[in-house]
Amino acid sequence: MIKAVVFDMDGLMFDTERLTIKAWDYAGEKIGIGKMGHMVYKTLGMNIESARKVFIEEYGERVTEEDLSKHAKEFFHDYYNYHGIPMKPGLIELLTYLKENNYKIAVATSSNKEVALRHFKRANITDYFDVIVCGDMIENSKPAPDIYLKASELLGVSPSECLALEDSPNGINSAFSAQLIPVMIPDLIEPTEELSGIVHSKLTNLHEVIELLNSIHMNSAG
């Protein structure tokens, strides 16, 4: 029986992974390194500390976190002021369905809390969530299980009764290791054969989560 649904954020609720590619391309050109958007694929699902190590391995001292952050924030600031936060189709419908059907709702995002809360405020969805766990609140980043274990603990729900919605391999491995029920809605990366072996379901959008929950409920009731 599913009692809770735990959401990833970037690439799952918001179409921000593609924006980050553009932002890091912009920052790289400003810094003089050239486009760096490809680094998104190497850091999907990681918190800032883990991503920092990947950048150091790739660029050494040629890129500082301060410069990257400064120019990326310039890009995001201009984009969000003009366009708003790009929500994935079906997000509001799914959150509304979950509230109406008494599911507990959490977020387990590798982004830091300041960024996550800013995004939720822009999208006007903060009040939907019972629990918000961010990358700066746990020790080990995805694919370690820490963030999902923390989310299920704060929800007061057994991991095996939590559906985890993810778009990245690191996120799926994190949820699986924490013994949640992992559901993948791919964004930038399709699941490998190995990853397909550990996901409960692969869906194409958030609308389909409602159908999945109805199906699971019917099977458990029967």
Image: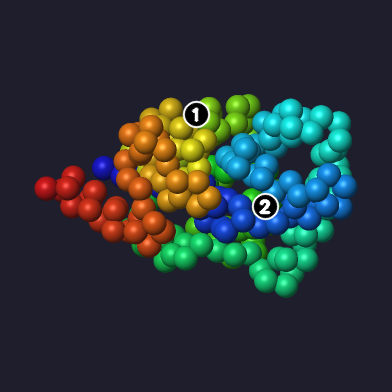
Q: Which residue is drawn at 64% across and 61% down?
A: 121
* Relative image position of residue 216 (x, y in whole percent): 24, 48
Q: Residue at x 35, y 48 (%)?
A: 202
Q: Residue 119 carries which label?
A: none
Q: Residue furthest left?
A: 222
* Relative image position of residue 12 (x, y in whole percent): 51, 53
Observer-side mark, 1 or 2, equals 2
Res 129 visible: no
What secondary structure is found at the residue carrying circle 1? loop
Q: From mark 1 to mark 2, how far is it between C-alphas?
A: 26 Å
What secondary structure is found at the residue carrying circle 2? helix
Q: How has the structure been colored for display?
A: rainbow
Q: Which residue is disc 2 drawn over?
A: 21
The three-letter amino acid code for the residue at tag 2 is Ile
Query: Residue 81 or 30: which is nearer the viewer?
Result: 30
* Relative image position of residue 61 (x, y in whole percent): 86, 31
Q: Which mark is residue 145?
A: 1
